[in-house]
Amino acid sequence: MPPRDQHTDGASGSAAQPLRSDAERNRERIVAAARTVFGRDGLNASMASVAREAGVGIATMFRRFPDKEELVAAVFTDRMDAYVRATEEALAEPDPWRGFAGYVETVCAMQAADRGFADVLTMSLPGAERLEARRAEAYEGFLELIARAKDSGDLREDFTSRDLVLLLMANAGVLSATADAAPDAWRRPVAWMLQSFRTPARGPLPDPPEDAALYQAMRRAGPGLASTESGERH
Amino acid sequence: MPPRDQHTDGASGSAAQPLRSDAERNRERIVAAARTVFGRDGLNASMASVAREAGVGIATMFRRFPDKEELVAAVFTDRMDAYVRATEEALAEPDPWRGFAGYVETVCAMQAADRGFADVLTMSLPGAERLEARRAEAYEGFLELIARAKDSGDLREDFTSRDLVLLLMANAGVLSATADAAPDAWRRPVAWMLQSFRTPARGPLPDPPEDAALYQAMRRAGPGLASTESGERH
């Protein structure tokens, strides 16, 4: 992306805001729209639906973001920063197990808060270099969390960093099926998995969703006509 | 659906096969195509993509199956029958825990074998009455499996039948992200969950996927341009 566009990303101060070109305004508008659309529909949302949400033409869209990965990077860089901070905070926790388990829960909560970011966390985006660099930093921190929790005898020895990816994929499955209807449903499966990671005893579990909420969730995850048809209509 | 079409559903004997009308041939062709498309892409696959696979026009498609749920029912009734048989077989297993855990694994393996069925298992399809009736039968059997495994002291008391739905949603998330690249990746998270359901000790875990396979999986679950664009192209 051109460097002169970068200041449009930040929530910059009001007073000395420079006059912005149409191109810059369009870029801002597209990023804001993508934040909404990806957050709601995940990264499978089409570039066309982002353009519609932004109220710009598809040509403008592709002029500003020739590549979906660039758009994803522009939208999720700040969340990726928060993801890195979460490892730092977890490492500052003196208890190794609490650091480890708290981190896993925090990341799962970040997935729950943003479906697009849930996708980002279980994807590789080689075209988005800055974002991948941050992911690599977070990964290093997570390796340290694993090592600490194994050294203290809390985390089972066969746990690997790849297991976090599997857990996040599982969480994404629960989230995409339950999202609006049972927004806390993911906490229970995540608790199962954390309990099975721990070497000795088990704690209590969060409650499962109500029948009615779960039924709603099953409807929401239904034949997918809504998303498919709206995709075809345009 | 018109009753006279029903015999085209079975893999009927060869000799006395009646002459079939165009309508019947189209119906067969559509069901076969939907089996392929849903199995590969899940139930979010559009009716249009099924029509393309079947080589019939969209009008013909909607004449035979005015409603996606009817098509889903036609495709998955036999798998739902197998799902019911799985509870019966699990109840025939004398060891309550083996019956319970084996059933959970069998259902997860059925998800792994067919992405469309993976969707069916975590969805409610009120329009597909026969299929829902079979699901209700399987549910009754599963309640019995739960009760047996709790009575024997193997299954934690706070396990509920809703937990199977959560587990299947989690499994669907792993499957949809890892499918071709790491087709056995789902076994490890399912093992975590089963271990956390069990009252005392834990067994060994299946290996996690190789780094390379998991990377492939992350690419496959990437920005989803392929599916979105093919949906919009037509």
Image: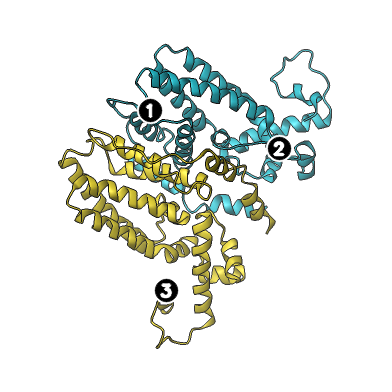
Chain colours: A cyan, B yellow
- Among the 4 quarters of the image, the one containing residue A208: top left
Marked residue chain, label 1: A
In the displayed structure image, the side of residue B6 where residue B134 appears, left or right = left
- The residue where tag 2 is placed is A54
Would you say the residues marked 2 and 3 are in contact, meaning their CB atoms lie under 8 Å apart?
A: no
Amino acid on which disc 1 is placed: Glu
Residue B178 seen in the current view:
yes
- Mark 2, other Cα within 10 Å: few <14 / some 14–19 / many ≥20: many
Q: Which mark is residue A98?
A: none
Q: Nearer the viewer, mark 3 or mark 1?
A: 1
Q: Position of residue B52 (x, y in %)?
A: 61, 66
Amino acid on which disc 3 is placed: Asp
- Mark 3, other Cα within 10 Å: few <14 / some 14–19 / many ≥20: some
**Which residue is found at the position 40% from the left and 49% from the top?**
B122
Q: Residue furthest left?
A: B151
Q: Secondary structure at mark 3?
A: loop
**Which residue is found at the position 71% from the left and 41% from the top?**
A51
- The residue where tag 1 is placed is A157
Residue sitting nearer the eye, B179 or A105: B179
Residue sitting nearer the eye, B133 or A148: A148
Which of the marked residues, 1 or 2, is nearer the chain's N terminus?
2
- Mark 1, other Cα within 10 Å: few <14 / some 14–19 / many ≥20: some
Would you say the residues marked 1 and 2 are in contact, meaning their CB atoms lie under 8 Å apart?
A: no
Would you say the residues marked 3 and 1 are in contact, meaning their CB atoms lie under 8 Å apart?
A: no
Q: Nearer the viewer, mark 1 or mark 2?
A: 1
Q: Position of residue A108 (x, y in %)?
A: 47, 30
In the displayed structure image, the side of residue B30 where residue A63 appears, left or right = right
